[in-house]
Image: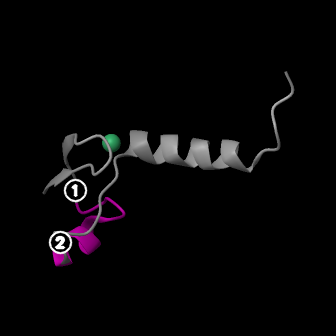
Amino acid sequence: MQVKCMMCGKKEGITEEHVDYRKLQKNPKAVYICNLCMARTFHEAKEGQKPHKPM
Ligand SMILES: [Zn+2]
């Protein structure tokens, strides 16, 4: 199945093994985020929780 990352716009083919496969199959408008953007988002969220960086 072809999906498009909502963050970077990259098109990817996913298989039934993908976590979001069923969700996207049921609802093609469901949001898909590629692994790279997922990792980036996670990293940014983690960074955002940190107190101010020491200079
Ligand atoms: Zn992406």
- What's the coloring here? one colour
- Tell me the residue at 16%/69% (across/down): 28
- Tell me the residue at 87%/27% (across/down): 54
Task: Report, in whole angstroms, how far the alpha carbon at label 2 lies from the one at label 1.
Answer: 11 Å
Give the quarter of the image for residue 44.
top right
- At mark 1, the secondary structure is loop
Give the quarter of the image for residue 25.
bottom left
Query: How far across and how far down the image is residue 37, in percent?
Result: 41, 43
> Label 2 crowding class (10 Å Cα cut-off): few <14, some 14-19, many 20+?
few
Of the two numbered discs 2 and 1 in the rendering, the one whose residue sits closer to the viewer:
2
Q: Tell me the quadrant of ligand 1.
A: top left
Q: Is residue 45 magenta?
A: no
Q: Residue furthest right?
A: 54
Q: Quick one: label 2 or label 1, which is nearer the N terminus?
A: 1
- At mark 2, the secondary structure is helix
Give the quadrant of the N terminus: bottom left
> Label 1 crowding class (10 Å Cα cut-off): few <14, some 14-19, many 20+?
few
Location of mark 2 (residue): 25
- Tell me the residue at 25%/73% (across/down): 22
- Tell me the residue at 29%/40% (across/down): 8
Q: Please, what is the three-letter code of the amino acid marked with disc 2?
A: Gln
Write down the region rendered in magenta. Answer: 16-26
Query: How far across and how far down the image is residue 11, in percent?
Result: 17, 43
The disc label shown at residue 15, or none: 1
